[in-house]
């Protein structure tokens, strides 16, 4: 059965109204993840976002609206636009997994945060890891690569935090973790997707080789209130 993809046209909104509604800060037609879980928000119906942005900025000073350009409060700077590609995959990846992949729990939390801080600090918050399952590879008693799940709707799960320690790149760890994560998501009868900055040529090529296709472009509007 063909699954409608409408939710992917506004993934933050549908994540916050489907699976992650408990983590939403609700301003009506504008919703944000609670700052402990993520820096993202979205809106519908061409809503005037200025009031919600001003209010949300009291909780977190650096955050994003994903989708159409938001209307800003008068005394705020114009938002900074980042263009991301939304990529999706429908089938299991036929690649070998030769490394031991660990399902991360609260016991691995400090290791996860230490790795995230190296390359991914602005997007990963203190409770982001609770939005889905995270998987990692350990070498030399150190977590050196990780991949996890972030936004979730009724039919889709976003793959996120594809991170490899700078000292351990080029060994195929990301490829194996993505392969593993895609398989786990498909076993939940959901479809994996991800977002990647359009300037990140290396990761984009990796995702394409693994079978992901570009579905659409997205604007991530960064709002800095201080």
Image (tube, rainbow, N blue to C red):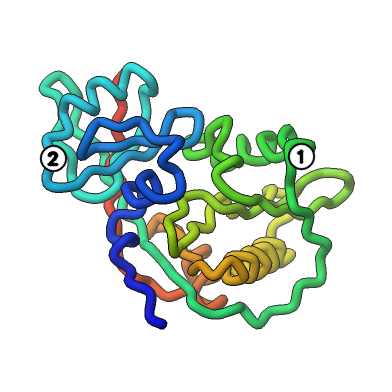
Q: Looking at the image, which is closer to me, 30 or 60?
A: 30
Relative to 128, say whether 44 is above or below: below
Classify residue 221 by image quadrant: top left
Relative to 21, say whether 152 is above or below: below
Classify residue 223 by image quadrant: top left
The mark tally for this picture is: 2
Query: Residue at image x 45%, y 49%?
Result: 19
Q: Residue furthest right?
A: 140
Which quadrant does the C terminus fall into?
top left
Horizontal relation, residue 201 to residue 177: left or right:
left
The answer to whether the residues at label 2 and label 1 have Cβ atoms under 8 Å apart is no
Q: Which mark is residue 108?
A: 1
Query: Residue at image x 68%, y 62%?
Result: 177
> Residue 126, percent across and down?
57, 30
Q: Nearer the viewer, mark 2 or mark 1?
A: 2
> Residue 20, percent across and down?
45, 44
> Residue 183, percent across and down?
63, 71
Which quadrant does the N terminus fall into?
bottom left
> Residue 180, percent across and down?
68, 67
Residue behind mark 2: 47
Mark 1: secondary structure: helix
Horizontal relation, residue 69 to residue 91: left or right:
left
């Amino acid at each position: 059965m063909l699954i409608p993809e409408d939710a992917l046209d506004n993934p933050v909104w549908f994540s916050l109204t489907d699976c992650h509604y408990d983590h939403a800060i609700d301003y009506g037609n504008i919703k944000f993840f609670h700052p402990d879980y993520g820096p993202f928000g979205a809106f519908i119906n061409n809503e005037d976002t200025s009031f919600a942005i001003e209010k949300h900025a009291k909780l977190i000073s650096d955050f994003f609206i994903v989708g159409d350009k938001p209307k800003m409060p008068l005394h705020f700077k114009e938002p900074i636009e980042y263009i991301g590609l939304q990529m999706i995959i429908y089938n299991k990846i036929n690649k070998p997994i030769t490394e031991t992949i660990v399902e991360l729990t609260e016991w691995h939390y400090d290791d996860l945060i230490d790795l995230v801080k190296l390359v991914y600090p602005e997007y990963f918050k203190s409770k982001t890891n609770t939005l889905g399952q995270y998987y990692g590879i350990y070498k030399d008693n150190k977590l050196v690569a990780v991949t996890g799940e972030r936004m979730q709707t009724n039919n889709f799960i976003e793959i996120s935090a594809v991170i490899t320690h700078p000292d351990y790149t080029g060994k195929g760890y990301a490829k194996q973790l993505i392969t593993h994560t895609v398989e786990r998501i498909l076993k939940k009868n959901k479809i994996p997707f991800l977002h990647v900055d359009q300037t990140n040529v290396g990761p984009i090529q990796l995702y394409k080789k693994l079978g992901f296709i570009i579905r659409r472009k997205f604007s991530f509007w960064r709002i800095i209130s201080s």
